[in-house]
Image (cartoon, helix red, strand yellow):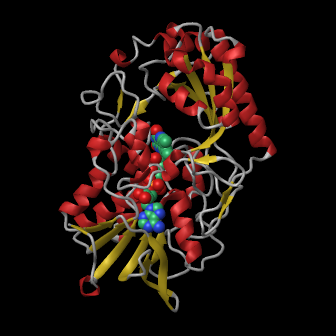
Amino acid sequence: MIKNSYSLQDSNVEYLVVGTGPTGATIARELAIAKKNVLIIEKGKWHSEHTLGFPLGIRILDGFGYLSKSIDGTYIGRAITVGGCSMVYNANVFNPTNHIMQALGMDLMPEVTAIRKEIGVSVLPERFFHHCEGGNRLREAAYKMGLTFIPQEKFINPDKCKIGCDWCMLGCKYQAKWTSRAYLKEALQNNATLIHSIGVKKVLFHKQRAIGVLLENNQKLYAQNIIVSAGGIGSAQILLRSGINYAGLSLFIDPMNLVIGYGKDASYGGWKEMTFTHAIESFKETHGFIISNISASYAAIATSLRNQVFLNHLKDLPYIKRGIGLFVKLADTPYGWIRSNGKTCKPLTMIDQHHMKVGTELAKDILQKAGISSKNITVVEMIGGHPGGTAAIGKVVDKSFKTEYDGLYVCDTSIFPESPGIPPTLTLLALAMRFSQRLLGNGR
Ligand SMILES: Cc1cc2nc3c(=O)[nH]c(=O)nc-3n(C[C@H](O)[C@H](O)[C@H](O)COP(=O)(O)OP(=O)(O)OC[C@H]3O[C@@H](n4cnc5c(N)ncnc54)[C@H](O)[C@@H]3O)c2cc1C
C-alpha cells in the first residue's frame, strides 16, 4: 500500500524502515514476507520509469549530479528516488571480497549464492560489443600491455536491454536493469506500507529506546523498531540530527578519475557503447583500483563536470562520436566526514593519491596505445559514487547492526568499516538479507 499521509492511529508498526535502496527494500521485503507490520519512509519520489534515461533522468540524482560536491570539490553521486542508487547504478555484480567479509566478521556467501540465482546475473552477449571499434581498440591495446579487460557480470536482462543505449546511470526506461524497486514491490504486495516524497529528519527516543521518527514536515511516527537504511550520506545525517554525534566519520567514497580522450575519427571513439562492460581487475588487491571503459556520451558528460576540462574539450563537442575514456575507481581510506547538514569532506591520504596516480597513468597509457594522442587526453578528477563508512560496525553499530539505543538499527553502506573495494550492491543485498533474518530470529 502506498500512502501520502499517515495517522497515529495506524501506528501499530513493528518495523519502520528508512530508505528504499538495495538494503532498505530487501529488509522491508524480508520482514513483510514474514508477516511483520512494516512501514517504509522514502525521501525521494516514485519517478515514473517512462521518464528515466536521457535527459530527464538527471533529476533523480542528488543536485542533478552537478551540485552534490564535498567542500574539497569531490563529486558525490547518489540518487534520491524510490529505489535509491540502484536506479542509477551500472548494475555490475561483484562478489564480496574476502577482506570485507573479514572486516564485517561474516561469511556472506550463502546469501550471495541465493541472490545471484534469484535475480539472475549475466555477462552481456557479444552482440552488445562487436560493433564497438573504439572499445575493441582499448581492449587490444591493454592486451598487448599484458593487461586483461574482463567482461563484467551484470544484473541486466539482455533480452530487454537495447544495444547502443548507455543510460543506466540516468535510470533504465526499458526495465532491463534489476533495481530494488522489484523487492520493494514484493514488500508492498505483502502488506508493507510506503510513504514516499518525504524524508526522516531524526529519530525520537524515550530514555535508551528509539520509539519513532520525526519527518521533515514535523509529523511524528511511532514504531517498535527503527531501521535506518538511507545510504552512506543519508543515514549519517539522520543519526547526527538525532544526537548520535560520533556518526558521520570514516567516510569513503570510492573516488574515480575519468581519463577522457578524443580520437582522430569516430572509429577511435566509444559511440553507442555501454559504460563499464569490461574491467581490469588485476590491481584490486595490490593498489585498490579497477579500470573500466567509458562511452562517448559519458565522456562528453564527464568533461562538463570540471570547468577547465570542459574548456579544453569545447572544440571536441561537435565530434562527440570520437570521445572515449577509462575510469580508475579507487577503494580509498575511510578518512572523510559528513555533517548533519550534508556538508562533506573527502581528502585522500598520500597512499591513496599514489595509487590513484598509478591507475591514472596506466589508463592514459592504454588510451595512447589505442591511438589517442596525448594532446587530446584529459582527466576529470575525484568523482565518487559509493559513499559509506559513516556508521561503521564497531564504531556506531555493533555486530548485530544495533546502535547504542534499543530498537535502533542501521543497515546499509554506512556500516562498512572500510571500502569493500568493489561496487557493493550484491554485498549489500546479502548483508540486508542476513540482518533481516537475524531480526526474525533465523540468524546465523
Ligand atoms: C552512478 C552510480 C553507479 C553505480 N554503479 C554500481 C554498480 O555497477 N554496481 C554496484 O554494485 N554498485 C554500484 N553503485 C553503488 C550502489 O548503487 C550503492 O552502493 C547502493 O545503491 C547503496 O545502497 P543503500 O541501500 O546503502 O543506499 P541507497 O541506494 O543510497 O538508498 C538510500 C535511500 O534512502 C533514501 N533517503 C536518503 N535520506 C533519507 C531520509 N532522510 N529519509 C528517508 N529516505 C532517505 C534515498 O532517497 C535512497 O532511496 C553505483 C552508484 C552510483 C551513484
Task: Pinpoint residue 277: horizontal percent, then vertical percent.
Answer: 45, 26
Q: Residue at x 53, y 25 (%)?
A: 293
Q: Could you tell me how many numbered marks the image carries?
A: 0
Task: Pinpoint residue 138: horizontal percent, then vertical percent.
Answer: 56, 14
Q: Residue at x 40, y 47 (%)?
A: 86
Task: Pinpoint residue 335: horizontal percent, then vertical percent.
Answer: 71, 55
Note whether residue 105 is visible: no
Task: State which quadrant residue 218 falls in.
Answer: bottom left
* Camera-side residue of 354 and 312: 312
Which quarter shows the N terminus?
bottom left
Q: Residue furthest right?
A: 350
Left or right: residue 137 versus residue 287 is left
Which quarter shows the C terminus?
bottom left
48 vs 138: above or below:
below
Task: Pinpoint residue 264: horizontal percent, then vertical percent.
Answer: 59, 7
Task: State which quadrant residue 302 falls in.
Answer: top right
122 vs 382: above or below:
above
Left or right: residue 121 versus residue 403 is left
178 vs 3: above or below:
above
Note whether residue 274 is visible: yes
* Camera-side residue of 184 and 168: 168
292 vs 427: above or below:
above
Task: State which quadrant residue 165 falls in.
Answer: top left
Q: Residue at x 40, y 37 (%)?
A: 55
